[in-house]
Image: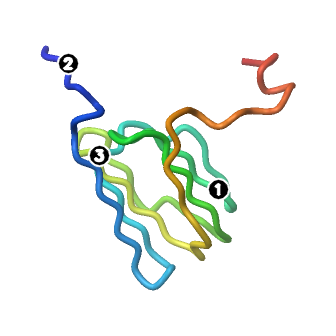
Amino acid sequence: MIEKNKQTEMSDVTVTSREKLTATGVYEVTGFDELQIEAKTAQGMLLVRGNGLHIDSFDADVGELVLSGRIDGMVYCDREPKRGFWAGLLK
């Protein structure tokens, strides 16, 4: 199997009416609740914040994530978000 260079792959995000988000180039969903969804993508960590967030579908083979809810904001970052003190100990 040939390993792909994740940084050169495409990753697109489409937000529709702040109620639906579709992201491509997603490798893994690392955390989620009704207020935040964290996903590893070809372009870094994607953090989506809002209210009533729900993952409608995630296909790791295709790399597509679809979520719905009230989307208040999103950001890409180059490293994983910091966890609390206890989360690091219980890892």
Q: Position of residue 71 (x, y in %)?
A: 57, 72
Secondary structure beneath disc 1? strand
Q: Is residue 72 above or below residue 38?
A: below
Mark 1 or mark 3, earlier in chain: 3
Task: Name the residue carrying label 3.
Answer: 25
Q: Is residue 66 above or below residue 28?
A: below
Q: Position of residue 26 (x, y in %)?
A: 35, 44
Q: Quadrant of residue 73?
A: bottom right
Q: CA distance from mark 3 to mark 2?
A: 15 Å
Q: Around disc 1, counting alpha carbons within 10 Å, would you say few (fewer than 14), some (14 to 19), or many (20 or more)?
A: some
Task: Name the residue carrying label 1.
Answer: 36
Amino acid under disc 1: Gln
Residue 53 horizontal side relative to residue 20, left or right:
right
Mark 3 or mark 2, earlier in chain: 2
Residue 17 horizontal side relative to residue 47, left or right:
left
Task: Name the residue carrying label 2.
Answer: 3
Mark 2 or mark 1, earlier in chain: 2
Q: Position of residue 18 (x, y in %)?
A: 50, 80
Q: CA distance from mark 2 to mark 1?
A: 30 Å
Secondary structure beneath disc 2? loop
- Foreground pick, 81 / 52: 81
Q: Is residue 41 above or below residue 13?
A: above
